[in-house]
Image (spheres, helix red, strand yellow):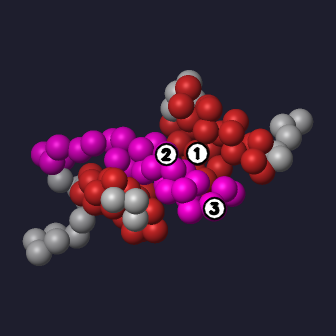
Amino acid sequence: MEYDTPRSEFCCRLGYYFLEKGKFSQAAFWYKLATELPAPNNLWAIQNHASRTWLPHLQLGLCYYQMGEYELSYRHNKIAQTYRSNDQNIINNVNLLKELLKINDL
């Protein structure tokens, strides 16, 4: 951070650090920031597309679930699902949260 603003890859790594420590609020902060940052302009930089798309949303879903924020968890799992529609883990998360929130698809 001394040389430039953080990139989504860095934010996801910090989020994971806090997630592993059970500090879900701090982890959510970094994962949320990862979703808000633009892609780097430097075409020579190694970029991890997942760190700007489905991964931070999936992890936000986990953080919010652990904090009892089921609606936010559901919302972020649904966003992750837009990137990985056939991911069985995301599908299972969405279905579990639908049951908790009593959401009926028509």
| Number of dots carrying numbers | 3
Q: Give the magenta part as a residue range.
A: 43-71
At horizontal 63% and vertical 61% (from top left) the residue drawn is: 69
Visible residue check, residue 25:
yes
Q: Is residue 37 left or right of residue 93?
A: left
Residue 58 at x, y = what percent? 49, 45
Whether tag 2 and tag 1 are in contact, CB under 8 A, the answer is yes
Which residue corresponds to mark 3?
A: 69
Q: Is residue 50 left or right of residue 71?
A: left
Which quadrant holds the C terminus? top right
At horizontal 84% and vertical 37% (from top left) the residue drawn is: 105
- Quadrant hosting residue 10: bottom left
Which amino acid type corresponds to the residue marked 3 in the rendered image? Glu
The local secondary structure at tag 2 comes to helix
Which amino acid type corresponds to the residue marked 1 in the rendered image? Asn
Which residue corresponds to mark 2?
A: 58
Residue 60 at x, y = what percent? 49, 55
Whether tag 3 and tag 2 are in contact, CB under 8 A, the answer is no
Prevalent SS, magenta region: helix
Q: Which mark is residue 77?
A: 1
Q: Check the image and name the residue furthest to the front.
A: 22
Q: Residues within 10 Å of mark 1 (few under 14, many from 20)?
A: many
The local secondary structure at tag 3 comes to loop
Q: Residues within 10 Å of mark 3 (few under 14, many from 20)?
A: few
